[in-house]
């Protein structure tokens, strides 16, 4: 009896073979990348800053902070990312974000859950888009990731708790200081939903950590509304040396 699902799956795989998420070549594994593309992606592993997840170039004691977090700790308690955002890895995110490559969401979510720290039943929230941008793009890539992560971990997915009340210009060409100013007062929690946050742990999901300004602005609003603590999880992370 156990053979039927397996045979059916093999038949489907023959009709629709798995392809590398980066180059599109046919692959046999379920990890999403072919043998040639896998070494090109700089996956983030320890050691890294306990708070923001910035990878260190050398071994350091557990719980150590980077210089930036030592000077001023963010509002989020921890931030983790799957890989360094480089010229080789950015096409994975850009295709997912701008070319409707929605089939990548399950794969990316499976990578992301391996990077998340041990949390006890957090509310899983995406960084929201302004409604006008969502209307034009038709989907929020961060919401797709958050929903998949919540399903994999059996956590509560709460996409409407945090909303973007102000449409902000693109962060792409802004400095860190400009980014902080740009997203200031851009997010809010609807009054009717603040009670759902009281004393809760939140996992905030986004596609890319650049300076952390957006995640920090969201975390500040969530804590002010009554959340116990906020953790952040992204697919990619910009590291200056790269």
Image (cartoon, rainbow, N blue to C red):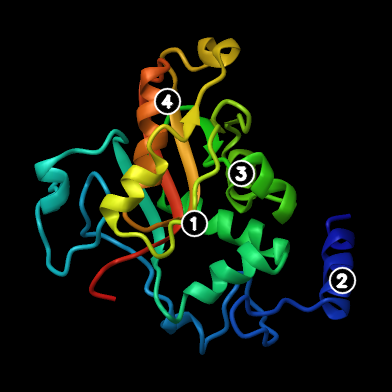
**Upstream in sequence: badge 1 or badge 4:** 1
In the image, residue 229 lies at what x, y percent? 35, 26
Q: Secondary structure at mark 3?
A: helix
Cα separation between marks 3 and 2: 23 Å
**Upstream in sequence: badge 3 or badge 2:** 2
Cα separation between marks 1 and 2: 41 Å
Kindly identify the residue that appears in the image at 61 percent across and 44 percent down. 152
Q: Are marks 1 and 4 in contact (CB under 8 Å)?
A: no
For label 1, the residue is 170
For label 3, the residue is 152
The image quadrant of residue 191 is: top right
Q: How many marks?
A: 4
Answer with left or right where residue 119 lies relative to residue 150: left
Cα separation between marks 4 and 3: 24 Å
Q: Are marks 3 and 2 in contact (CB under 8 Å)?
A: no
Q: Tell me, for residue 12, which label it has, or none.
A: 2
**Upstream in sequence: badge 2 or badge 4:** 2
The image quadrant of residue 216 is: top left
**Upstream in sequence: badge 4 or badge 3:** 3
Answer with left or right where residue 167 lies relative to residue 7: left
Kindly identify the residue that appears in the image at 55 percent across and 43 percent down. 167
For label 4, the residue is 222
**Upstream in sequence: badge 1 or badge 2:** 2
| Residue 204 visible in image | yes
In the image, residue 82 lies at what x, y percent? 42, 60
**Screen quadrant of the C terminus:** bottom left
Q: Secondary structure at mark 4?
A: helix
**Upstream in sequence: badge 3 or badge 1:** 3
Cα separation between marks 3 and 1: 31 Å
């Amino acid at each position: 009896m156990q053979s039927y699902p397996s045979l059916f799956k093999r038949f489907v795989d023959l009709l629709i073979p798995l392809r590398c998420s980066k180059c599109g070549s046919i692959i046999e594994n379920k990890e999403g990348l072919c043998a040639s593309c896998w070494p090109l992606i700089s996956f983030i592993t320890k050691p890294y800053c306990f708070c923001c997840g910035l990878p260190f170039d050398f071994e350091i004691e557990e719980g150590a902070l980077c210089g930036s977090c030592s000077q001023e700790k963010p509002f989020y308690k921890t931030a983790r990312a799957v890989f360094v955002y480089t010229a080789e890895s950015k096409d994975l995110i850009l295709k997912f974000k701008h070319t409707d490559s929605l089939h990548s969401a399950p794969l990316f979510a499976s990578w992301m859950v391996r990077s998340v720290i041990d949390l006890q039943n957090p509310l899983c929230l995406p960084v929201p888009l302004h409604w006008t941008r969502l209307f034009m793009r038709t989907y929020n890539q961060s919401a797709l990731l958050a929903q998949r992560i919540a399903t994999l971990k059996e956590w509560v997915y709460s996409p409407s708790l945090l909303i973007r009340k102000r449409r902000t210009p693109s962060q792409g060409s802004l400095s860190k200081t400009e980014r902080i100013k740009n997203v200031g007062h851009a997010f809010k929690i609807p009054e009717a939903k603040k009670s759902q946050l009281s004393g809760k742990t939140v996992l905030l999901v986004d596609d890319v950590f650049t300076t952390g300004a957006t995640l920090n602005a969201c975390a500040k609003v969530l804590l002010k509304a009554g959340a116990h603590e906020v953790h952040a999880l992204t697919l990619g992370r910009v590291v200056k040396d790269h």
